[in-house]
Image: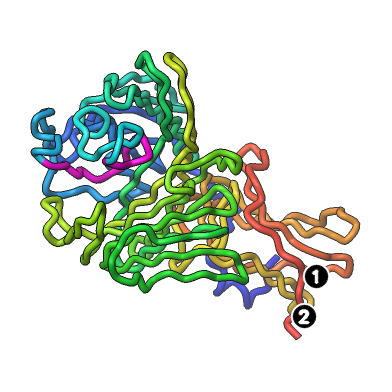
Amino acid sequence: MNPEGDKARRPMNTSPGHSIADSPCSIDGVNYKGWKSLSLTNGLLELFVVPEIGGRIIQLRLGDREYFYVNPRHLGRVYRQDENNFEAGWKNYGGCKVWPAPQGWSDDRHWAGPPDPILDGGPYRLQVLENSSDSVAVQLDSADDEYTGLRLSREIRLFRNSATVQIRHRMRNTSFRPVRWALWQVTQQCARGGSSVTVPLISYRKIYGNENYPNIEVLSEKNLWRLSYNDQVAKFVVNPESGWLATAHNDVRAALVETFPIFRDLPYPDGGPLEFWVNGKGTFTVHGEVINMEKDPNGCDPYIETEVLSPLIDLEPGQDYVFQVCWHCCAMDGGTIAGVNSCAAIEKPLVATVEDKNVRVRGSFGLFQSGILEIVPIHRSGETGPVHVVGPAGPLEACLIDESIPFENALFRVALRLKNAGGKLLGTVDGALLTSDI
């Protein structure tokens, strides 16, 4: 038990009678900012899907926190094909969509969009795959696109008591010729005060932006690359060490973690599985033409595109390829993200300090599931000591740990674990070796 002096600093409700709120799933048709939309929710998350505008996930909410940029110039609008082509100009709605890659305008091995009246701006067919209290899922299918030879599909799924979204992208060769494309998920996230993206780094390079972009930080001791939003246009290609990126939205104290597979032996468009577009003022040059962002009819609003790509895949007629990306949402205390695991985003890694006859355990995390937190003392022999129950926690509130457990001579390290209401282990949030405060 914590000594009386620790109660004032305890950041969590550790009452053993406190229960975990159950979060069943549901699907409903709603109006989102003038669009006919489908709402997928589980009490933690809510997704708004608009099939008519390129099968977009137009908004993602964690509680009342909104992650995605939605362009106010196009609210509720659904444009005809002749209003969504090169002559009429691209209609950047915002939200999250899937495109084919590589992008380019030099030959038919490159996708010349956006705009694209079928894959980007056209209506997608909607199917409800599952609608139960434990899971909801929908599928969105584009029309067959003659230029690329593709039909693009997205299967979007939510789970009970979880702040994870599973998105399975599929491309099918519906033509009579072999094609070679990659899947390209493009998500426009609001870049308000203090927004930043963190990636475990191998290498990176800037491919667009005529001015130096100042807000890049490489933390070599942690092997992390961090981009903080600056109102200046730029684009980067990043090769990550492992398959995650984390976007911190400090103004709403929340983070969106995206996880994805990496295929080291396969080629990628632009040479990497991650790209980041920073929307802001300034110019960039493409095919010798200087583009001034402040003259864009879609506006020059602040957002960061987090772009996750599959490798380039050769498809014979009738073949398809599936690429899965997951989103993991959580509240955070603010600041930056130091790491990610299957259970949590780590803001301040766990620290266990011997203080007199107790061990003080501290850390700051964002959880991807609801459950009961517990601190498990682990001896050098591998045996565990008495479990210290911290209490209920979940994605809607930052997980701030400041607890004390009794010191034992054989104690070597501690683990912070999350279990469900039935006692099943959901995962280890973090662990720490004991250190001394002397």
Secondary element type, mark 1: loop
Residue 115 locus on image (x, y percent): 20, 38
The residue at which mark 2 appears reads as 356
Q: Which mark is residue 167?
A: none
Q: Is residue 119 above or below residue 289?
A: above
Q: Nearer the viewer, residue 392 or 434?
A: 434
Q: Residue at x 55, y 40 (%)?
A: 261
The residue at which mark 1 appears reads as 407
Residue 138 forms part of the magenta stretch? no
Q: Nearer the viewer, residue 239 or 245?
A: 239
> Magenta residues, as a range?
89-105
Residue at the far right in the pictured view:
381
Could you classify mark 1 by the number of other residues whose Cα lies within 10 Å: few (under 14), some (14-19), or many (20 or more)? some
Q: Residue at x 43, y 43 (%)?
A: 269
Q: Residue at x 44, y 60 (%)?
A: 205
Residue 159 locus on image (x, y percent): 48, 33
Q: Nearer the viewer, residue 11 or 429?
A: 429
Q: Are marks 1 and 2 in contact (CB under 8 Å)?
A: yes
The quarter of the picture where the N terminus appears is bottom right
